[in-house]
Image (cartoon, grey):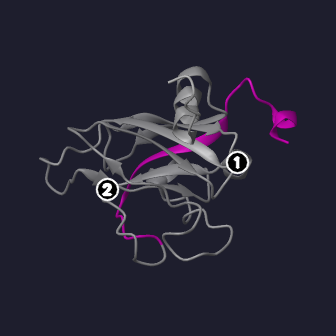
Amino acid sequence: MADRQKTPGDIFAEILEDNEPMAMAWVTGGSGAPALSGLVKFYETPYGGTLIEAELFGLPDRLQTGASDFYGMHIHESGDCGDDFRNTGGHYNPYQTAHPQHSGDLLPLFSNQGYAWISFFDKRFTIPQILGRSVVIHQASDDFHSQPSGNSGEKIGCGVIRLVNKYDKKNLG
């Protein structure tokens, strides 16, 4: 086993286990899911791009009317989560690409009795590019083809992406 080279997955597991994220978004629910809360963490990697880890609680259970087991998760342009998330703007899309290839498109959440955990690598943005923007949780899964943003329904959760305290602007490169 000592001769085996580390894969990117091995490196990502070490990052999640040993390092603090560079940025985080504390997600809270709005009127559509008041019990929703959780944390989305953003880590630097040696491969460029960003490692994302999300853990959410209080997602509407599929046994509730109008709920499912899948929820859209996107990065939105604005970090204004006020007014029941109406001010978050559209998906973060700096290169004006079609959905689902734009930078704000993230993997959907799969809920198990209101709980979801996911971790994935995304090379379409760096952490400095998303600071001050928002992570938005939607009431339905992204359909991956409707334009411009996947028809994932009402915004039920939101959190502003903020730098973790140990980092400062001079460390952003």
| Nearer the observer, 155 or 97 | 97
- Residue that carries the numbered disc 2 in the rendered image: 139
Q: CA distance from mark 2 to mark 1?
A: 31 Å
The picture quadrant where one finds residue 66 is: bottom left
Q: Is residue 162 magenta?
A: yes
Position in image of residue 121 (x %, y %): 54, 47
Q: Is residue 119 left or right of residue 125?
A: left
Residue at (12% x, 47% y) in the render:
63
Query: Does residue 137 appear left or right of residue 6 in this picture?
Result: left
Please state the horizontal and vertical placement of residue 167, each as a whole percent of the image. Answer: 76, 29
Q: Which residues are magenta?
A: 149-173
**Callout 1: few (<14), some (14-19), or many (20+) C-alpha neighbours within 10 Å?**
some
Reply above or below: 63 against 106.
Answer: above
Element type at marker 1?
loop
**Residue ID at (66%, 49%):** 49
User: What's the amino acid at mark 1?
Assistant: Gly
Residue 80 seen in the current view: no
Left or right: 99 in relation to 70: right
Q: Are marks 2 and 1 in contact (CB under 8 Å)?
A: no
- Which of the 4 quarters of the picture holds residue 124? bottom right
**Other-residue count near label 2 (Cα within 10 Å), few / some / many at <14 / 14–19 / ≥20:** many
- How many marks do you count on the picture? 2
Name the residue that disc number 1 marks: 48
Q: Amino acid at mark 2?
A: Gln
* Residue 74 colored in magenta in the image: no
| First of labels 2, 1 by sequence position | 1
Name the image quarter holding the C terminus: top right
State the residue in front, 99 or 75.
Answer: 99
Q: Residue at x 32, y 40 (%)?
A: 34
Front label number (2 vs 1)? 1
Q: Secondary structure at mark 2?
A: loop
Question: Residue 132, percent across and down?
Answer: 67, 47
